[in-house]
Amino acid sequence: MSEADPTEVFFYHLERAPLERVLPQLLEKTLERGWRAVVQASTSERLEALDTLLWTYRDESFLPHGTARDGDAAEQPVFLTTTDDNPNDANIRFLVDGADAGDLEAYGRAIYLFDGRDEEAVQRARTQWAAAKDAGHDVTYWQQSESGAWEKKA
């Protein structure tokens, strides 16, 4: 990333589908683009749940990924963590359950996913939005429509 290219920061307001359905789809698209990803959760319990989810979310497929427990972090196309590290030189960072980002300058894109039915999560996302704007990032807001499609709102 150069200073001329601010990190794109997307906020995904989940209303129709839960994180457990949306995150695997977004990670699949990330890997299809040849990108690497870091997924940052706010708790170790959530990290374990996401680890299991990515192995089992579909009967015919799984998403290759790892955690610090697995070792070889640099080799993982998707790395799950509760910290703001980037051990696999990821292009994109996903932040879930209110996880706070450290410096996003190393990424082409960062995506905050938050539950629109949880008022505390919405308030936290507003605070994170303001911080991303203040940091000079290119910030956009996406919301699920009635059909479940993503619509750019801001």
Image (cartoon, helix red, strand yellow):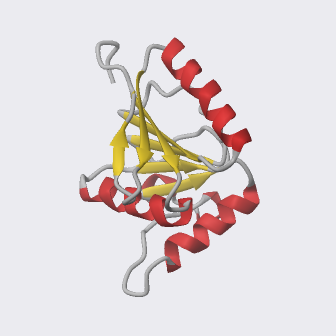
Q: Residue at x 46, y 60 (%)?
A: 22
Question: Does residue 84 appear left or right of residue 22 in this picture?
Answer: right
Residue 23 visible in the current orientation = yes
Of residues 22 and 69, the one drawn nearer to the viewer in this rendering: 22
Whole-percent x and y of residue 75?
43, 58
Q: Residue furthest left?
A: 33
Question: Does residue 120 appear left or right of residue 93 in this picture?
Answer: right
Q: Residue at x 47, y 59 (%)?
A: 23
Q: Residue at x 37, y 86 (%)?
A: 60
The quadrant where residue 151 appears: top left
Whole-percent x and y of residue 54?
51, 70
Q: Is residue 76 above or below residue 144?
A: below
Q: Residue at x 62, y 51 (%)?
A: 81
Of residues 95 and 86, the one drawn nearer to the viewer in this rendering: 95
Q: Is residue 86 above or below residue 107?
A: below
Q: Quadrant of the N terminus?
A: top left
Q: Residue furthest front?
A: 146
Whole-percent x and y of residue 36?
37, 50
Question: Does residue 10 appear left or right of residue 114 in this picture?
Answer: left
Q: Is residue 83 above or below residue 125?
A: below
Whole-percent x and y of residue 119?
71, 41
Q: Is residue 52 above or below residue 2?
A: below
The quadrant where residue 50 appears: bottom right
Of residues 17 and 3, the one drawn nearer to the viewer in this rendering: 17
Q: Quadrant of the C terminus?
A: top left
Q: Please give the count of numbered marks on the rendered protein.
A: 0
Q: Residue furthest bottom?
A: 59
Residue 102 visible in the current orientation = no
